[in-house]
Image (cartoon, grey):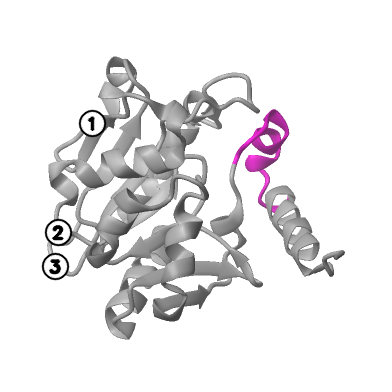
Amino acid sequence: MSTLKSDPVAIVLAAGDSRRMGQDKLLTMLGKKRVIEHTLRTYRKAQRVQDIILVIPPGAESTYEPLRSPTLHLVENPDPTRGMISSIRVGLDCGWAQERNFLLTPGDVPFVSSEIVDQIVTEFVTRRCKVVLPTYKGLGGHPGLFSSDLREDFFLRGDTNGTREILFRHQRETVRLHVHEPDVCFDIDTAEHLAMASDPGARWARVMDMVEEKRKPKLR
């Protein structure tokens, strides 16, 4: 990992209850690794990521302890029932995130390439914007990169619609980076998604279905 001052920390959100999966999806095996290990590998390999903050459920530190390293830090969310915004706040409140730009991603987006992450960071620095969001054929993906200037927004807003509230306020300062990698939009919510995850064709087909659904005219 690099040590440029402009390089962000990555906040990986792993404190959800996996309700649709029926078990902790992030600890489920996907090939020879758990889902969360695939996700973390992306940010460990990225050249332009400072540290990784993994936000985990309460009481789960022993479970996730083997993942800890000098650059990967475990932080518990004491009350994940308050939604994803609560995990974002926990991540932003820890020492490794202070005065740093930050990448945000759910832990269930396991196949984003480290090259795409580095591209997002480069775009952010070059364009001098507040937010960079990767998109595939118009569909928003992960990770998003946010300026440290927006840190307080995540504490003052987001209780109703989460990150969307912050993005809405900063539309004019947001760059939507069009990438050719459908995996920025592929997450694992159900056992069906897990089953298709090892097959690139199947998961990309799911993303294209999402793209087509988004393109459909909305009924008024």
Question: Does the magenta run of residues contain 114?
Answer: no
Q: Which mark is residue 68?
A: 1
**Prevalent SS, magenta region:** helix
Position of residue 217 relative to residue 46, above or below, is below
Residue 203 lies, in percent from the top left, at 69, 49
What kind of element bears circle 2? loop
What kind of element bears circle 1? loop
At x 18%, y 69%, the residue is 6
User: In the image, what residue type sits under mark 2?
Assistant: Glu
Residue 50 located left or right of residue 12: left
Residue 190 lies, in percent from the top left, at 67, 32
What kind of element bears circle 3? loop
Gap between marks 1 and 3, in whole Å?
22 Å
Q: Which mark is residue 99?
A: 2
**Res 79 quadrant in image:** top left
Range drawn in magenta? 188-201
User: In the image, what residue type sits under mark 1?
Assistant: Arg
Question: Does the magenta run of residues contain 191?
Answer: yes
Disc on the earlier residue, 2 or 3: 3
Work out which residue is located at the far right of the displayed protein and give it. Answer: 219
Position of residue 194 relative to residue 216, above or below, is above
Estimate how packed mark 1 is, as few (under 14), some (14 to 19) or many (20 or more) residues with alpha carbons within 10 Å: some
Instruction: Specify the quadrant that holds the C terminus.
Output: bottom right
Residue denoted by label 3? 4
Residue 87 lies, in percent from the top left, at 36, 38
